[in-house]
Amino acid sequence: MNMLKGLGRNAGWLLAALLWCSLQAQAQYVFTTIDDPIAKTNNNNLTEVTGISGNTVVGYFYGPLLHGFYHVLGTSNYVTLDEPLGFANGTSDTQPSGISGGSIVGFYQNFLGGASGNYGFLYNIASGTYQSLNDPDGDFGVNSSTWPTAIDGTNIVGYVGVSVPPNLDYIGGFKAQSTGTGFVYGAPFYYPVISSITINAGYNTTNYATYITGISGTNAVGYYVDQSAVVHGIIYNLLAGTYTALTAPNGFGCRLTGIDGNNVVGYYADANHSYNYSGFVYNLASGSYTATSIHDPLAPGSSYLLGISGNTLVGYFLDNSGNTHGFAATLPVPSISLAATGNGLVFSVTNGIPSATCHLITTTNLAVPQSQWSVISTNTFNASGVFYYTNTASLTAPARFFGLNEVP
């Protein structure tokens, strides 16, 4: 909700106006392709966008190794990231996976001396410095197995590979907190719990693996893999230690990949696109899907939705050659302006979704819930995302508040 600028008096009456937008399930996103210029120069159009904070996205590209980058949307500014500890011998892969403000988390592989472990890092954009982020429980594989995937403020989540005798290997979620000079790690956690994993004759017969891929406040999201290799989305409350399962819009399994406030994103096999992967958005507060088939219009195949920040979603899609291209999908937020004319007031609403239907609503009391505001006009955005409406004013009318409620 944004308070409209330029409130003023006209012929003795005072008008107050504000914008209230409620974006619905099948709103039309505007997609922008993101290809790292180095990947394009190398004739190797393989770019994957993995996270977003504000107007800055992170991801990695092939060139021919995996190189991280961050990019400011709407600009040509791309900055390459190569974790120096792993890149010392020029053979490391660097994969940023999450961003919060000026902090980026991710992981890299270091092949020096025959090693093949995965190591975490925290990168500070302002200082250009890296910190190693390796969960001490991440002992699965060679040397290390720590995959930081998301950050919110100083809190970081991801997953680790843990070995449990005799020769049992698990993937578990983890949470770490940055202290500025180091990290405080919590114990790995599993879905449902590690004690529920069945061990028979020295083997893990249930194959539970828990992947945590996003965090916002006290909620983390991710997915687990059951004994039949079916993937299930989960929301994990970090304070209570409780899980909530979430299926895809079609009722089947999915991967949850990001969260911002009450909005959770993920992707699933979408029958609307011949079972290619599409993304979705789920709102925790309403308990409903607000977008059910996020699929880049340039993608003949799968689109993978990996992150969210406000009204912008990010991920990547596959082209006909199997190359990957990053994307940002933005939901337009209409803006409203007012102009007095005679004894009337002209509302000009721009940046709407073409063909979307909107109600102009009003109230004299901001304490009244939006659902109880009065509808004074129903309008449709034109092809340019604009509509106009003129309202008659009264010299004796009380101050009123106006809003825009966008509906399917």
Image: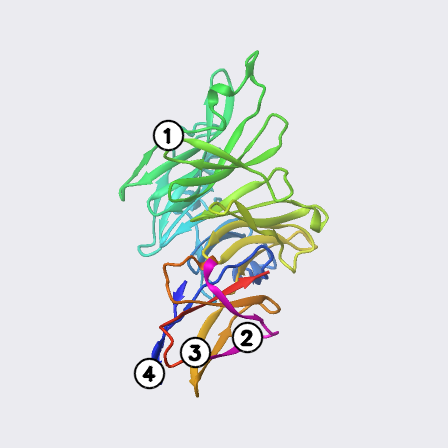
Q: Image quarter for residue 144? A: top left
- The tag on residue 338 is 3
Q: Using the numbered discs, state the Cα–Cα distance from disc 1 to disc 2 in whole angstroms.
A: 56 Å
Look at label 4 and name its amino acid.
Answer: Gly
- The tag on residue 386 is 2
Q: Image quarter for residue 340? A: bottom left
| 146, above or below 392, in the image | above
Q: Disc 4 designates what residue?
A: 12
Q: Using the numbered discs, state the Cα–Cα distance from disc 2 to disc 4 in whole angstroms.
A: 29 Å
Badge 4 crowding class, 10 Å Cα cut-off, few under 14, some 14 to 19, many 20 or more, is few
Quarter the C terminus occupies: bottom right
Q: Residue at x 70, y 51 (%)?
A: 273
| 14, above or below 93, in the image | below
- Nearer-the-camera pick, 233 or 402: 402
Q: Is residue 323 magenta?
A: no
Secondary structure character of the magenta stretch overall: strand
- Disc with the residue nearer the chain's start (1 vs 3): 1
Residue 125 in picture, x, y percent from top left: 35, 55
- Disc with the residue nearer the chain's start (1 vs 2): 1
- Disc with the residue nearer the chain's start (2 vs 4): 4
Q: Using the numbered discs, state the Cα–Cα distance from disc 1 to disc 3 in whole angstroms.
A: 59 Å
| Residues tagged 2 and 4 counted as in contact (Cβ below 8 A) | no
Q: Nearer the viewer, mark 4 or mark 3?
A: 4
Q: Disc 1 designates what residue?
A: 136
Look at label 1 and name its amino acid.
Answer: Pro
Q: Using the numbered discs, state the Cα–Cα distance from disc 4 to disc 3 in whole angstroms.
A: 16 Å
Residue 150 in picture, x, y percent from top left: 43, 44
Which residues make up the magenta segment? 372-392
Q: Is residue 388 magenta?
A: yes
